[in-house]
């Protein structure tokens, strides 16, 4: 338990650490390990039990209890200013060497008015109840390998034309999701020449998306499919702009589903001029 640590980052470059150490000694914390789901059912005529309509996850309420014993007045003012109303912060939870994070909105901070040591209660509401890994999983589906090797003591270039790199394209890659929670993707289509209508599909489900556009060398098309972050951005000639109007009707905002996923990219023309990088953040129902 001594390795258990909470770090609150208020998004303004300030961090407060709460653990088994002063100045904020952790007493207890609620809301880290439980999952709360709202289950909607409907009863039909002459039906035993009820019919399941939907299940959705409720918001998460994390309540931190800790103690302060020195410079109590200054710490009280610091806590009040550190958790301002309406601001979004990030809570990092480290347990047994594993760190996960979750975004929060402050609900309240209470410091006991009397005592040599004062009990502090911090309530954080997390509209998205899922915890996330600190680092993303990243897959380069098409990369460039160098072809030039030099001996340690010789640097000699041939006079005739020669290849410096070669492209190693993996049109399909397997992505494993060890969690039981689906997660969004960030997909970058990077054009090294002319490309028409790039697309990405999950092979097993046959679901996917296509973007109706023509890309030229240097263009970068970024598609994100995460929770409350579904968008398309196109960067061309150094200018980035929204491109949701290029979304082809009937496409699916692909997720990394639990288990094994096999993603394949393509284009109506110019697929050899396309580099693709996929990244996603593992998510969990608890710490």
Image (cartoon, rainbow, N blue to C red):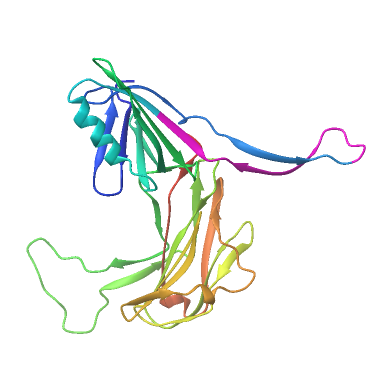
Seen from the viewer's position, the closer of residues 128 and 210 is 128
What residue is shown at x 33% (from left), y 44% (from top)? 84
Residue 136, percent from left and from top: 38, 50
Q: Is residue 259 left or right of residue 93?
A: right
- List x then y, in percent, for residue 19: 29, 26
Q: Residue furthest front?
A: 113
Q: Residue 151, position in %: x, y?
A: 13, 63
Q: Looking at this view, is 257 or 149 the one in front?
A: 257
Q: Quadrant of the C terminus?
A: top left
Asked if residue 48 lies in the magenta stretch, the reply is yes
Residue 154 placement (x, y as % from top left)? 8, 67
Q: Is residue 10 magenta?
A: no
- From where the camera sits, is residue 287 visible? no
Quadrant in which the N terminus is drawn: top left
Look at the picture and state if 80 lies above or below 230.
above
Query: Furthest residue to the left?
Result: 153
26 in relation to 100, above or below: above
Q: What is the quadrant of residue 240 in the picture?
A: bottom left
Which residue is farthest top? Answer: 116
Identify the residue at image location x=56%, y=45%.
258
Q: Which residue is depicted at the point 53% across and 59% down?
A: 263
Q: Tell me which segment is drawn in magenta.
A: 45-63
How many marks on residues? Answer: 0
Residue lying furthest right = 46
Residue shown at 25% from the left, 31% from the top: 76
Residue 62 makes an appearance in the image: yes
């Amino acid at each position: 338990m001594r390795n258990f640590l909470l770090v609150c980052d208020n998004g303004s470059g300030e961090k407060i650490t709460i653990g088994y150490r002063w100045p904020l000694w952790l007493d207890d914390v609620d809301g880290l390990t439980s999952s709360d789901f709202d289950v909607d059912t409907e009863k039909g005529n002459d039906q035993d039990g009820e019919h399941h309509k939907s299940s959705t996850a409720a918001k998460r309420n994390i309540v931190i209890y800790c103690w302060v014993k020195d410079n109590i007045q200054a710490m009280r003012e610091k806590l009040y200013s550190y958790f301002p109303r309406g601001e979004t912060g990030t809570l990092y939870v480290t347990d047994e060497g594993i760190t996960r994070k979750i975004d929060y909105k402050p609900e309240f901070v209470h410091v006991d008015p009397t005592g040599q040591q004062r009990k502090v209660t911090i309530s954080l509401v997390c509209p998205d109840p899922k915890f996330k890994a600190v680092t993303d999983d990243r897959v380069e589906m098409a990369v460039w390998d160098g072809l030039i090797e030099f001996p340690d003591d010789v640097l000699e270039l041939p006079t005739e034309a020669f290849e410096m790199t070669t492209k190693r394209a993996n049109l399909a890659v397997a992505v494993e999701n060890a969690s039981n929670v689906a997660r969004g993707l960030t997909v970058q289509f990077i054009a090294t020449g002319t490309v028409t209508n790039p697309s990405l599909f999950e092979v097993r489900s046959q679901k996917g998306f296509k973007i109706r556009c023509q890309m030229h060398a240097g263009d970068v098309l970024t598609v994100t499919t995460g929770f409350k972050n579904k968008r398309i951005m196109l960067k061309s000639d150094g200018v980035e702009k929204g491109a949701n109007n290029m979304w082809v009707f009937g496409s699916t905002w692909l997720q990394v589903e639990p288990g094994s996923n096999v993603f394949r990219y393509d284009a109506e023309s110019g697929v050899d001029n396309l580099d693709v990088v996929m990244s996603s953040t593992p998510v969990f129902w608890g710490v």
